[in-house]
Amino acid sequence: MTTHSPSPQADVPGSLVLLLAVGAGLAVASLYYSQPMLGVLGPDLRVGATTIGLVPTLTQLGYALGILTLAPLGDRFDRRRIILAKAGVLCLALLLCALAPSLGVLLAGSLAIGLAATLAQDLVPAAATLAPAASRGRTVGTVMTGLLLGVLLSRVVSGFVAEHFGWRTMYGAAALSIALLAVAAWRGLPRFAPTTQLPYGALLASLGTLWRRHPALRRAALAQALLSVGFSAFWSTLAVMLHGAPFHLGSTAAGAFGLAGAVGALAAPLAGRIADRKGPELVARLGAGLVAVSFLAMAAGPDRLWLIAVSAVGFDLGMQATLVAHQTIVFGIEPAARSRLNAVLFTAMFVGMASGAALGSLVLAHGGWTAVCAMATLTAAAALAVRMWPGAPRTVQA
């Protein structure tokens, strides 16, 4: 086990970047396994579509709460110890869901999954800390590729496993994957020196100070939150929509849409390189615009599966590019506060995710799939407006 962090001036070893990327992907995947399984979970637990929508909603809220209250600890303590502790809790939470005898237990387990899965948000600042400034966007982009592939491919895997082996098997397999990750992290992660000695209360209070001090942080958080509303609404309602007329498709088909989105996720390192060369503002604007156009196209052809799949590639690419750009902006604001800055950004993002999950189910029930796509288009257009609003940087970084 390495006992010291590599020098921030040296390139991060490829094996360590791979560990960070895979770890982020497996951790964050735990948040999304439930979404393609909702069509199976509801009937099995004898609850309606609106009620079963509480599963992803509580998971996203747990994640937002965990980022707000736990992620800042990465500036105060050794991130390696925090990652190992959260991996243990996440494994137990997934096992609780696998054995859940009722909806209430499943909801409690889902909230715990959200809280513990924030270990992904300890891995991303770790990558930013280890990488030299000249390649920080590329390194963060690579780790974020792993994270978003975990988001997207989790749906492919869970949809297939739920349909053929049952949803409890999926949760059990997820627990095993996190146990293996914990072993790999124990062996491969370096230690990280704390960057602050603030007590816990002061550490949390400093989040508000950072928010007030840095307009760039506020702009990034608001834009990412708005994009996340439509992103989460899409994935939280897709399985229910595909189960009904005119498609009548199972959870495997819903999960397979993650493959389309994964194509977009693979472009994250490219987005990081462009952010390093041309500046993250350009990448953020292009990404938000692509998300808006993709959802608008989907709203125009709500009964065409091929158009939904192509649009999923577009909006996932836009989401990933914008997130990498926002993280590049945020991580460059105040290096000693990277965990806290990341916590603010991702708290806003997952409040948007939780809102999207709740609003998506409500809008689908009352307005149909076209209304869900229209809502996502509006929130993406609002995010683009935030990035284009007077006062945003007009120049790009060299």
Image: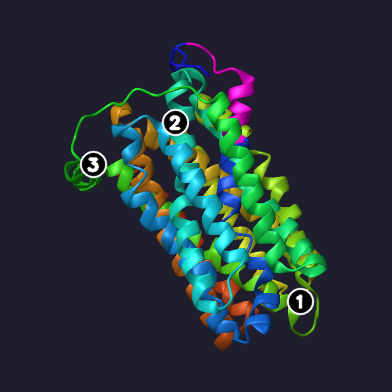
Residue at image point 61% right, 67% down: 99
- Spatial distance from mark 1 to mark 2, Cα to Cα? 47 Å
- The answer to whether residue 13 is magenta is yes
Q: Please, is residue 53 above or below residue 195 in the view? A: below
Element marked by disc 1: loop
100 or 361: which is nearer to us?
A: 100
Magenta stretch: give its range: 10-21
Which disc number belongs to residue 210?
3
| Mark in the foreground, 1 or 2 | 2
The residue indicated by pointer 2 is 80
Element marked by disc 3: helix
Question: Which one is earlier in the sequence, the residue at label 3 or at label 2?
Answer: 2
203 or 356: which is nearer to us?
A: 203
| Mark in the foreground, 3 or 2 | 2
- The answer to whether residue 228 is magenta is no
Mark 1 and 2 residues: CB-CB less than 8 Å, in contact? no
Q: Residues within 10 Å of mark 3 (few under 14, many from 20)?
A: some
Query: Percent x, y for residue 33?
Result: 64, 60
Residue at image point 46% right, 54% down: 384
Q: Residues within 10 Å of mark 1 (few under 14, many from 20)?
A: some
Which disc number belongs to residue 303?
1
